[in-house]
Image: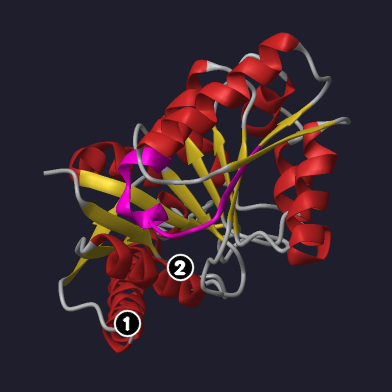
């Protein structure tokens, strides 16, 4: 049953927002929440040859001490991971979610998602992880890797939680974009939320028809959507629209046949995600 909300939490300031967003989605969809913390390989103790030219007896003692230190470090990392999960559970519980599970994983985060996403409704992740360089405005190093690898929708939480009251859908006419519209039409997550479907680019008969098809699909699901055509470049105009019109979330297909494709798999990902101060739901 693909109804679980998987929320990836770490020690970053985004974790609280991730928990609140996961709880908010759970309340709108009646889905359980699973909180996951992955102890990545980078958190494993470093293996270094510090023996140099030390004589055999001393080198053996040093290796034993290093092994003991490695074990202590691994134990502390595990304790920290469980503490992060306990804090996350408390947040989701206070938000009114009753079905909550936690899981501590080891290894690569993308590999972990590949093993557990089969029964997921959506994967919730923060824009940045605890290792991100805020001074340089970097996005989380795992964000694009997860988006590329995940087969379920990926909900990228903003730094601060705010209930979503309206949705902007970036639509380029491609299969991924139409799948995003279809997802909206089938999900209780979007029930009663005002939806605007926008194509950034030139107005053509093909664009007009695509927007009309999207609007009709949503209307059939009881969602009265507005449509717009906005000239310019997607990575610039989408962020502007979100800020100017106060949209609470941006929804877009992870792949497409226009410049919107580059927002996820190309170099403009970082610029667009930095400029967009609200959550982004990516579907492939």
Q: Residue 29 appears in which quarter of the rendering?
A: bottom left
Q: Which residue sits at x=62%, y=70%?
A: 159
The residue lying furthest to the left in this view is: 1
Q: Position of residue 213 (x, y in %)?
A: 52, 22
Task: Give me the C-alpha separation between circle 1 and circle 2.
Answer: 16 Å
Crowding near pointer 1: few (<14 within 10 Å), some, many (20+)?
few
Sooner in the amino-acid sequence: mark 1 or mark 2 = 2
Secondary structure beneath label 2: helix
Secondary structure beneath label 1: helix
| Front residue of 207 and 7 | 207
In the rendered structure, which segment of residues is drawn in magenta?
A: 184-197
For the question of whether residue 49 can be seen, the reply is no
Q: Position of residue 253 (x, y in %)?
A: 53, 31
- What coloring was used for the rendering? secondary structure
Q: Which residue sits at x=36%, y=63%?
A: 25
Q: Which residue corresponds to mark 2? A: 18
Q: Which residue corresponds to mark 1? A: 83
Foreground tag (1 vs 2):
2
Quadrant containing the C terminus in the rendered view: top left
Q: Position of residue 225 (x, y in %)?
A: 55, 43
Quadrant containing the N terminus in the rendered view: top left
| Front residue of 130 and 186 | 186
Q: Residue 83 appears in which quarter of the rendering?
A: bottom left
Q: Position of residue 122 (x, y in %)?
A: 34, 49
Residue 208 within the magenta-colored segment of the rendering: no
Q: Is residue 9 above or below residue 113?
A: below
| Front residue of 267 and 22 | 22
The residue lying furthest to the right in this view is: 232
| Front residue of 143 and 225 | 225
Left or right side of 16 for 30: left
Q: Which residue sits at x=79%, y=38%?
A: 235
């Amino acid at each position: 049953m693909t109804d679980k909300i998987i929320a990836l939490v770490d020690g970053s300031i985004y974790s609280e927002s991730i928990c609140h967003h996961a709880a908010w989605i759970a309340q709108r969809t009646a889905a359980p929440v699973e909180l996951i913390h992955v102890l990545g390989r980078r958190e494993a103790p470093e293996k270094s040859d510090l023996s140099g030219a030390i004589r055999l007896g001393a080198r053996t003692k040093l290796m034993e001490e290093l092994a003991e230190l490695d074990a202590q470090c691994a134990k502390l990392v595990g304790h920290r991971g469980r503490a992060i999960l306990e804090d996350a559970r408390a947040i989701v519980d206070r938000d009114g979610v009753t079905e909550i599970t936690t899981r501590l994983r080891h290894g690569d985060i993308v590999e972990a998602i590949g093993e557990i996403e089969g029964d997921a409704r959506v994967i919730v992740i923060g824009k940045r992880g605890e290792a991100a360089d805020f001074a340089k405005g970097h996005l989380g190093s795992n964000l694009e890797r997860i988006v590329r690898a995940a087969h379920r929708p990926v909900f990228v939480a903003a730094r601060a939680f705010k209930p979503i009251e309206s949705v902007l859908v970036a639509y380029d006419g491609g299969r991924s974009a139409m799948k995003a519209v279809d997802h909206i039409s089938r999900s209780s997550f979007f029930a009663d939320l005002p939806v605007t479907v926008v194509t950034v680019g030139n107005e053509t008969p093909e664009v007009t028809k695509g927007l009309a098809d999207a609007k009709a699909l949503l209307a059939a699901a009881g969602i009265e959507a507005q449509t717009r055509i906005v000239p310019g470049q997607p990575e610039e105009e989408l962020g502007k629209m979100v800020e100017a019109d106060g949209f609470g979330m941006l929804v877009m297909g992870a792949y497409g046949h226009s410049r919107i494709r580059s927002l996820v798999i190309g170099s403009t990902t970082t610029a667009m995600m930095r400029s967009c101060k609200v959550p982004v739901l990516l579907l492939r």
